[in-house]
Amino acid sequence: MSKYVRSTIVLAAALLVSAAADASGETAHIFWKDLRPATQSAAENVGLPMIAAKLPDRGETLSVNLQDKSIQLAGYALPVDRDGDLVYQFLLVPWTGACSHMPTPPPNQIVLVTPAHPYKMSEAYQPVAVTGALKPDMEKSQLFILDGVSVIQSGYSVRKANVVGVDTVPDTITLPVNSPWSFLNKKKN
């Protein structure tokens, strides 16, 4: 079975479980747009990620209607605390390259995740789905990157999260072909 077919089946199963749980009021499958105010656009220009500096509130307006609700959100994991390939805490971001290779997304588009158990991660920006209780919570994390330390502010946190690897993130931003960062777009075989 190809990797794409297997990941599609895993994601479909996760969505079915999420839909069943959502019907019983337990877990809601959300998208990145659900974390920002409805009046806030996704990007200034088509195909470009939204960055905090271009927003009037710097992206600090959070969606409190999701507070303490069990959610499932897919995104890209950027390790904050790790030991080898075991990750104890990571930032969940909406596109690859966010925070280290590209401008940082606004806080309402960053989730600080603490897995219930250390998550084995082979590379940064690995696509994952996170399930747990979402807390609007402005928090700063130190991110160690090749050229130094960066302080990243996240608008949400999920503690004791269930984390599973996925091959695709449904609402990811794909960078334009002529972008100098287009190498970050994952190619699927």
Image (cartoon, rainbow, N blue to C red):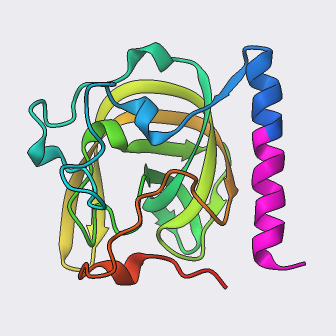
Is residue 135 one of those drawn in magenta?
Answer: no
- Residue in the image at 29% along x and 78% along y: 181
Residue drawn at x 31%, y 61% as measured from the top left = 47
Q: 67 above or below 155?
A: above
The picture places residue 83, in percent across and down from the top left corner, at 52, 68
**In front: 4, or 132?**
4
Q: Nearer the viewer, residue 92 or 16?
A: 16
Image quadrant where residue 127 sits: bottom right
Q: Position of residue 75 (x, y in %)?
A: 51, 53
Answer with the quarter of the image where residue 144 lies: bottom left
The quarter of the rendered structure image containing the N terminus is: bottom right
Quadrant in which the C terminus is drawn: bottom right
Drawn side of residue 99 relative to residue 68, left or right: left
Query: Could you tell me residue 98's position as x and y percent?
Result: 32, 62
Instruction: Please state the extent of the stretch shown in magenta in the rendering.
Output: 1-15
Find residue 128 and report its horizontal and vertical position in percent: 61, 56
Q: Is residue 52 above or below residue 71?
A: below
* Vertical arrangement, residue 6 with respect to residue 157, above or below: below
Judged left or right of residue 187, residue 178 is left
In-front residue for pair 136/37: 37
Q: What main secondary structure does the magenta stretch of the protein show?
A: helix
Horizontal relation, residue 72 to residue 184: left or right: right
